[in-house]
Image: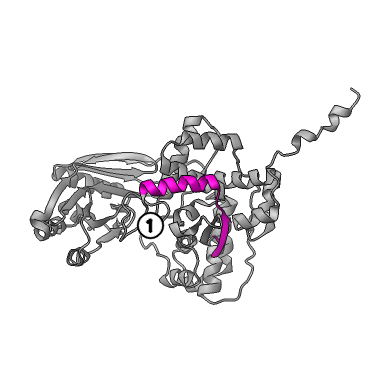
Amino acid sequence: MQQRLIEVEVIGRKIILKMPKNDADINFIRSIQYARWNKEGFFWDVPHYPGNLERIKQYFGERISILKEHEQIEVKIIGKEHKIGKNEVLILKSRSGRLKLIFGFHAGLMKVIKTIPYYKWDSKNKWWTVPYSEQFLEEIKTKIKEFGMAMKFEEEEMISGVVPKISPLDIPNYRKCPEEYVHKLEERRYSEGTIKAYVPLFEEFINFFSNISLEELGEKEVMEFSRYLVTERKVSSSHQNQAINSIKFYFEKVRGGERKFYHVDRPIREKILPEVLSEEEVSAILKATKNLKHKAILMTIYSAGLRIGELTKLKIKDIDSKRMQIRVEQAKGKKDRYTILSQRTLEILRLYIKQEKPHEYLFEGQKSTKEFPVKYSTTSISAILNKALNNVGIKKNVTVHTLRHSFATHLLERGTDLRYIQSLLGHESPKTTQIYTHITTKGFDQIKSPLDGLDL
């Protein structure tokens, strides 16, 4: 049996390794410090540290079929694309008063950076940062010139009137979220989305008071931080509410304190009516979507009133064609529910499954296999909808969630009782579902303004 070959790609400060599943090879990769499996891209991500590429070449030898080493590093910072050549250094003076240094692997320059007090390696973004001073900047410039490298220098633009979020680059001893905080979230079975939201929010809070230990933080700091979010960070009311909830979770669940009300000005959530599409607009979007898989995705979301995360988690077994229902497992609030399965959606799904042959999830990514099924990405679904919107010329502020709002509104306009709509959407409170009574235009044509009855 012919052995499958290995693909190695070197991009700036990381090595991308694609290889077939093999226990011996996996153990070798795991022996390399900081190597990790990228489940979205379906490859191994290995830092391009000294000797790592040589180790990989030596181990796999002739099994390596493709070896690419890119001449340029491409990074995106504050929405701006930067391309750095193999022998170039980009120095960016950040708004927080630190210097970001981005370059390909260079042992000499790395050694220079490590002589500067409070230097930091950002493993997520793959760049170095040091405190800004004219002295440090001149020293770095001199060394770059000595190494025969080219340099680009830029400054981030300040956002008028808004203080940026505290980041690991802003303070030398940035505190990470305590492990017990994350473990308690997991223990209480908080959703993956809530954990991803709470952790950075709580980190911002504890680093706002970087000189105060966690044990000494209390109500006074919560009040001060809340005012800071509103007056300086100018965050939305929903962001402020979630930040306060993340802090309350620490005091009440991690510390085990009594549940209490912190006397801060918790904002009233802005009452904004959601955007909805007309039935004609939904029809136009679906007609403009020619790809069978893409059409099946949009039809399933709209016809069943699904959230985008619920759609990606759907498995083939969740489609019940006998009862004409879709089972939504562990949706928002950790609740299971059933929603309706449209006959026309079922027909499209049967064609799609016959053509694409998904393994486990109803909709799977390109890298999905029987052994490692991969869910379809939410960003790809958003791209599908945006393409359709552009094709039909709809200018409304539409997201994938708009299809869910439209589903509920159209049901209400067709006479479906609000209690049934509440059940289909999985709303805990009927008040949440009642918002659609403010959106529907049904009956407006029967209402006459009193002005029209005046004798003018």
Question: Residue 345: x, y in percent?
Answer: 51, 46
Residue placed most toward the observer, 411 or 26: 411
Where disc 1 sits, the SS reads loop
Q: Residue at x 51, y 29 (%)?
A: 393
Instruction: Specify whether 194 is left or right of 357.
Output: right
**Farthest residue, direction front:** 322
Q: Is residue 161 above or below residue 210?
A: above
Q: Residue at x 47, y 71 (%)?
A: 214
Instruction: Please say whether residue 27 is one of the residues in the magenta stretch.
Output: no
Question: Residue 329: x, y in percent?
Answer: 51, 62
Q: Determine which residue is flagged by label 1.
A: 168
Quadrant assignment, res 336? bottom right
Amino acid, disc 1: Pro
Q: Residue at x 46, y 38 (%)?
A: 386
Q: Is residue 157 visible?
A: yes
Q: How many marks?
A: 1
Instruction: Specify whether 379 is left or right of 272.
Output: left
Q: For the C terminus, which image quadrant?
A: top right
Q: For the N terminus, which image quadrant?
A: bottom left
Question: Residue 12: x, y in percent?
Answer: 22, 48
**Farthest residue, direction top:** 456
Question: Residue 235: x, y in percent?
Answer: 55, 50
The residues colored magenta run: 332-356
